[in-house]
Amino acid sequence: MSILKTGTSRRTILKGGAVLGGTALVAPHLFIRRASAADYLNAPSGSTVTFGFNVPQTGAYADEGADELRAYQLAVEHLNGEGDGGMLNTMKPTALKGNGVLGKKVAFVTGDTQTKSDAARASAKRMIEKDGAVMITGGSSSGVAVAVQSLCQEMGVIFMAGLTHSNDTTGKDKRANGFRHFFDAYMSAAALAPVLKKEYGTDRKAYHLTADYTWGWTQEESIKASTEDLGWETVAAVRTPLGAGDFSQYITPVLNSGADVLILNHYGKDMVNSLTQAVQFGLKDKQVNGKQFEIVVPLYSELMAQGAGEAVKGILGSANWDWKLTDPGTQAFVKSFGQKYGQPPSQAAQTCYVQALLYADAAERAGSFAPCAIVEAFEGSDSLPGIDSASNKGFLFDGMGNGQTLYRAADHQCFKPVLVVRGKESPKDKYDLLEVVEEVPAKDVWYEPDNPMFAGGDLGQCNNGV
């Protein structure tokens, strides 16, 4: 079945046969309480339950949005018992059996965020009010994620964030009804700093070009803090509008700034355009301050590398996940995704697929789709090994492509290994553009909930919507 077209909000269900469930790492957490239809908003009364997939089908992040929709459709197929089951076979622990969720088949509706907060809120609101969506998931912009997470908290449904990297999503703008699987800007900076020190030394002058919204701001703040701790000097930090297209007016001043590193806090097509234009301006071939000029892109992926082409060679950055990892969960997902779509999945696809399965599993464990029951299922008492912290409590899972991962109860942020990646000099094909330089363990990117970069927010109480 094809993915719904842009702008539609039509109820869709995928049906099929049974699929094998995963082998449990530990016994699944099971909750006895079952909420009645009067206890929460959009309680399903028929044979199906509706998920709302809200992704950028147009705009600067549309490529990521298209891959997210592919992943969501695959997740629905696997939840309903179609295909080979993908990560249902590797997820540990899991209460899912590949026969729907709580005896109901999963249906879905879609919306286009347009990478705009107002449009994203409007499409999410429509799916909740008109289509009866019991949860909303998706997005490739932190501005969108913060806006939709707030809406879901107000209306009383769960928000399973898609690709959102701003510290604010689970920092000052965190909400009890919201959950993020993707890593954040602080983690990128913590993972990158030792590699930047090793590769480029401690005496550097950095020039930042930064997407002018919540993600860019917190990415710039995080990478500045980590590089200045190394001894780097920040020469300038210039904000650029989302979807600028032509970055030449922002790159030209870099040439005469005295900087010997350009840090591009850009994502999606903006990253593709700014990096390509920086290379065309000859920055990578320059010698400044007696050093080879370098370009760093703190967050990028194989999908963006395809757009940047030759320009990505040698560029360091961080990633949430990469399809070339060899763990069983990654291999199962890549196989399923490749068989269906004829290409490897992006990190956006992986995190969205995982979020859909995690929500479904939490509902199955809780015995209810009620938001407060879902929250309780995620706010467990498990701990991530190797981290001595009172805040190291939550729901621990494995087998989904990132190793052991903790959904921390204190802020609903996932903690897991972070990848430092580099553009390959001699790729095999257009899907083999990045090499993993280091897989940084979760303990090295850990921070406490009261870290100053995440301060000011209040998780608050869950909202069932009635």
Image (cartoon, rainbow, N blue to C red):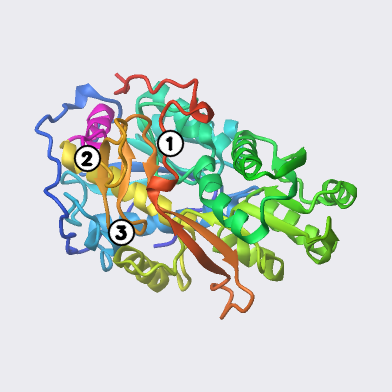
First reached walking from the N terminus: tag 3 or tag 1: 3
The question of residue 455 being in magenta is answered with: no
Residue position marked by numbered label 3 in the rendering = 77
- Name which quarter of the figure residue 90 lies in: bottom left
The question of residue 379 being in magenta is answered with: yes
Report the magenta residues as a range. 368-381
Say which of marks 2 and 1 sits in front: 1
Going by the numbered disc 2, the residue's amino acid type is Asp
Element marked by disc 1: loop
Estimate the x, y position of residue 200 in percent, counting from the top left: 67, 58
First reached walking from the N terminus: tag 2 or tag 1: 2
Q: Which residue reaches farthest left? A: 32
Q: Is residue 132 visible?
A: yes
Between marks 3 and 1, how big is the CA–CA gap? 36 Å
Going by the numbered disc 3, the residue's amino acid type is Glu
Estimate the x, y position of residue 414 in percent, counting from the top left: 37, 42
Residue position marked by numbered label 1 in the rendering = 447
Residue at 44% x, 66% y is: 323
Residue at 65% x, 62% y is: 315
Q: Quadrant of the N terminus?
A: bottom left
Estimate the x, y position of residue 205 in percent, counting from the top left: 76, 47
Residue 382 marker:
2
Residue 200 marker:
none
Element marked by disc 3: helix
